[in-house]
Amino acid sequence: MTVNYSDPWKDDPYGKLKGNKQTAYFKIILDEAKLYPIDNGYVLAAYVSKYEGILRSFKPERPLEQGLCAIPLYSQDYETRRKEGEKWISVPQRPSKFEQALCKYIEQNKNVFLDEKLVLSGELTHIPDGMCASLDANALNTLVADNFQVQSIPPSGLLKEYTPPSSKNGKGKSGNYYKGMSPDEKLAFVKKELVDSTGDETVNEEMSLAALIVTLKDKHSGDETLLAAYFDVLTALIK
């Protein structure tokens, strides 16, 4: 699995990094960032100026731009949810060795990393499990310190207000989860993507879904393979 960037949704100004990090190598440059504790780790809410090793979940050909992003860091097993038929099911996930060690490192240095009056600036390089497997606790801690290079600075206003995800009641330490989109939210999401992909100023989200699909097909009538792949990805995103 890979870690991808999902664009902001509705009124939330933050994009999201999603995916299992166990096999992922990536780097992010943080202009400003703030850590928020959650039940099973932290969320790093950041203004990111550069991404390496991360692609956009939808339209991966579009390069990532600097902006707000929320990066979850898990200290223990957690759950994601996916839809199968008409039901939502929980999917157990295991954090990477590096992010578990990073959470421990943050916990040990709370007075530095969780100062309410300051924000963090620097960079985070995530190391996959394959490069951590043979390390003992001390070596892993050193690796984390070398790859989470940040300093505390006064906030400049780059960061917007961030609300951490709420806890899932009754599941103990399985921790936080993200609810799936409602049917209305799915429809709005699909319409928005169709309008953006059509690139036609005469179309808008007030049009019917059928009309938007016909318009997009007319625009790309000569490339059925592209259209098929496009709708496959779109369908997968809303499941």
Image (cartoon, rainbow, N blue to C red):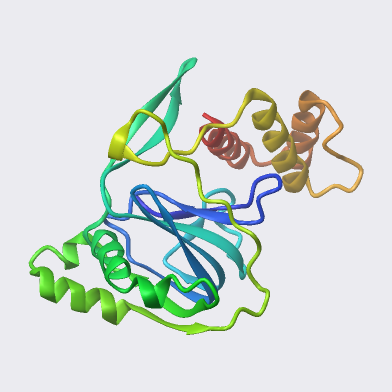
Between residues 238 and 138, which one lies in front from this camera angle? 138
- Name the residue rendered at 64%, 59% in the picture: 161
Residue 21 location, x and y as percent? 32, 55
For the image, the number of numbered tags is: 0
Between residues 106 and 220, which one lies in front from this camera angle? 106
- Name the residue rendered at 42%, 34% in the picture: 168
The quarter holding residue 182 reads top right
The quarter holding residue 32 reads bottom right
Q: Residue furthest right?
A: 202
Residue 38 location, x and y as percent? 41, 51
- Name the residue rendered at 36%, 29% in the picture: 90
Query: Along the horizontal axis of the image, is 89 left or right of 48?
Result: left
Query: Along the horizontal axis of the image, is 4 left or right of 92?
Result: right
Query: Along the horizontal axis of the image, is 100 left or right of 80?
Result: left
Residue 72 vertical placement versus 216 (above, below): below
Residue 210 vertical placement versus 54 (above, below): above
Residue 61 vertical placement versus 80 (above, below): below
Query: Along the horizontal axis of the image, is 81 left or right of 143?
Result: right
Residue 194 vertical placement versus 125 (above, below): above
Between residues 227 and 137, which one lies in front from this camera angle? 137
- Name the residue rendered at 76%, 27% in the picture: 209
Q: Residue furthest top?
A: 86
Residue 142 location, x and y as percent? 20, 79
